[in-house]
Image: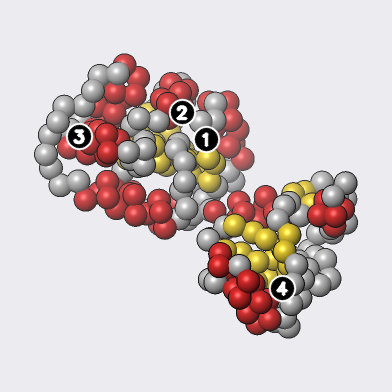
Amino acid sequence: MTPLRTLLAAAAVATLVPAHAGEAEIRKNLAATIPQFAKIDEVAKTPIAGLYEVRVNGTQLFYTDADGSYLLQGNLIDVKARKNLTEERVEQLSAIDFDKLPLQDAVKTVRGNGKRKLAVFEDPNCGYCKQFERDLVTIDNVTVYLFLYPVLGPDSVTKANNIWCAKDKGKTWSDWMGRGVAPEGKSCDTAAVERNRAFGQKYNITGTPTLFFADGTRVPGAIPAAQVEKQFAAIK
């Protein structure tokens, strides 16, 4: 077992709190030796005495000693509770208040009573997104907010703009993703697509599809319909 895993296996659960003693030294020393740490988002205490969490780039977590002389990267585990504290922390940091999503820039589709809500960031050329869409059509009683998020190249931007400019955006999207019917080239104000890209960059949406549920939970990847239903069921 590596020294890192030995240290992580000794972890006990506790709430992370803002660091005080040692924070300035950590920031100074890490920034002086590692360019990536020139801008540190947060330094916080961990359950282990003398071990600090260092957060950069929004959700990227590292661990260090009280003066920033050593740096660890990996998962902090609460063995007794069988919890991955690093994973839970990243999920907490990645969550987005659903009501703060720019829903006016999404393509809205309502199925059944539409009571359940799901937001999805997708690229029109993403194969995993097409797989996800095939599963998504089997889910009823849901309102889906599709955010066109072209990140796979210029053709993705063109297709996303054409879909946004279509008279029936939802049908044009489903025709393309489900049947390969390319959207017609049309011109309109596509600022919404650009805003989606800016929003995604701001909130570190690095892959498609990326899902957001009404409780703020972020789920990356083309999860199956059964997992989507399970996530809906978990929302209180």
Kind of element beneath mark 1: loop
Q: Which residue is mark 4?
A: 68
Residue drawn at the location 34% of the way across and 54% of the way down = 198
- Here the colouring is secondary structure
| Gap in angstroms between the C-alphas marked 3 and 1 | 24 Å
The label on residue 162 is 3
Residue drawn at the location 11% of the way across and 39% of the way down = 187
Mark before the other along the chain sequence, 4 or 2:
4
Amino acid type indicated by mark 3: Asn
Residue drawn at the location 30% of the way across and 35% of the way down = 156
Mark before the other along the chain sequence, 3 or 1:
3
The quadrant where residue 30 appears: bottom right
Can you give x and y, in whole percent of width and height, for residue 59 in the image? Answer: 57, 57
Kind of element beneath mark 4: loop
Q: Answer whether labels 1 and 2 touch (C-beta < 8 Å).
A: yes
Q: Is residue 140 above or below residue 92?
A: above
The label on residue 128 is 2
Q: Which residue is mark 1?
A: 221
Kind of element beneath mark 3: helix
Amino acid type indicated by mark 2: Tyr
| Gap in angstroms between the C-alphas marked 1 and 2 | 7 Å
Q: Would residue 210 appear left or right of 145 to someone viewing this image?
A: right
Q: Is residue 97 above or below residue 24?
A: above
The quadrant where residue 100 appears: bottom left
| Gap in angstroms between the C-alphas marked 1 and 4 | 35 Å
Mark before the other along the chain sequence, 4 or 3:
4
